[in-house]
């Protein structure tokens, strides 16, 4: 099955600040200029829309995970951005830890980092997102709905990946297709879009 979502490779990858909205670029540049953040260059990235901007987010980052705890010189927003980048770490346990930090204090600009994890293969991470989507407050319901609405091909790709990573016994014939947290999470996103459309 081909992946309709472009994953880009470039001789020089986008700068890490490009993963965040313009309103956060000063913080992103400050974060990336400190000794806290010196990751291995990301060679692949995906592009999504957030409001009226396109963000270029790394598919994977390789760095010393202990840097995620080096918060002494960072502001609150910069710490949150660091956890966003932690969701791109090559280690699934680090991605899960980073996600837990984001879910504890969700903001609209974090949405792309959360949604991307639905299409990855760590069941425990997807279950956390599925549970969080079921209990969003109204502002975050709107944020997730608008992100899903503005990135339909991306959401289709996430859904295809949840099918690919589903356990072999979890299929339509067994009646367990919708029991998988990835399927539930995508269904919740689609329902949020419909609800937002109906209340607009």
Image (cartoon, rainbow, N blue to C red):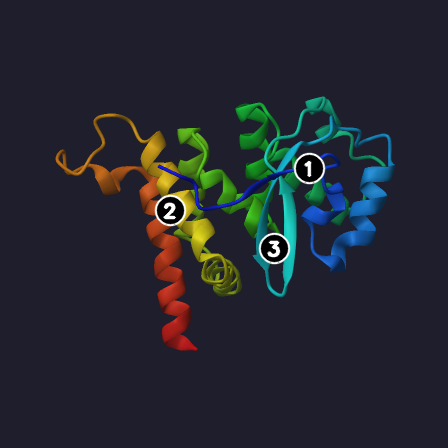
Residue marked by disc 1: 10
Q: Quadrant of residue 99?
A: top right
Does residue 79 appear left or right of residue 6 in this picture? right
Dot 3: what SS?
A: loop
Name the residue tied to disc 3: 107
Residue 131 in sight from this viewpoint: no
Determine the secondary structure under disc 1: loop
Left or right: where 118 falls relative to 20:
left
x and y, in percent, of residue 67 in the image: 75, 27
Q: Residue farthest to the left?
A: 173
Which corner quadrant holds the C terminus? bottom left
Return the residue nearer the eye: 147 or 133: 147
- Which residue is situated farthest in the bottom direction here? 200
Q: Determine contact: label 3, label 2, CB under 8 Å.
A: no
- Tag 2 residue: 185
- First of labels 1, 3 by sequence position: 1
């Amino acid at each position: 099955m081909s992946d309709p979502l472009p994953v880009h490779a470039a001789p020089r990858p986008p700068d890490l600040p490009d993963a965040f909205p313009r309103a956060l670029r000063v913080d992103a540049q400050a974060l990336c200029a400190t000794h806290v953040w010196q990751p291995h260059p990301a060679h692949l990235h995906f592009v999504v829309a957030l409001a009226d901007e396109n963000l270029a987010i790394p598919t994977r980052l390789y760095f010393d995970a202990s840097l995620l705890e080096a918060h002494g010189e960072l502001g609150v927003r910069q710490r949150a951005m660091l956890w966003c980048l932690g969701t791109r770490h090559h280690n699934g346990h680090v991605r899960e830890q980073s996600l837990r930090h984001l879910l504890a204090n969700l903001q609209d600009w974090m949405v792309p980092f959360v949604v991307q994890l639905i299409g990855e293969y760590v069941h425990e991470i997807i279950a956390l997102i599925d549970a969080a989507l079921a209990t969003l407050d109204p502002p975050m319901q709107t944020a997730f709905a608008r992100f899903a609405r503005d990135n339909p091909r991306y959401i289709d790709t996430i859904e295809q990946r949840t099918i690919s990573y589903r356990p072999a016994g979890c299929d339509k014939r067994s009646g367990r297709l919708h029991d998988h947290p990835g399927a539930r999470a995508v269904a919740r996103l689609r329902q949020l879009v419909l609800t937002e459309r109906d209340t607009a």
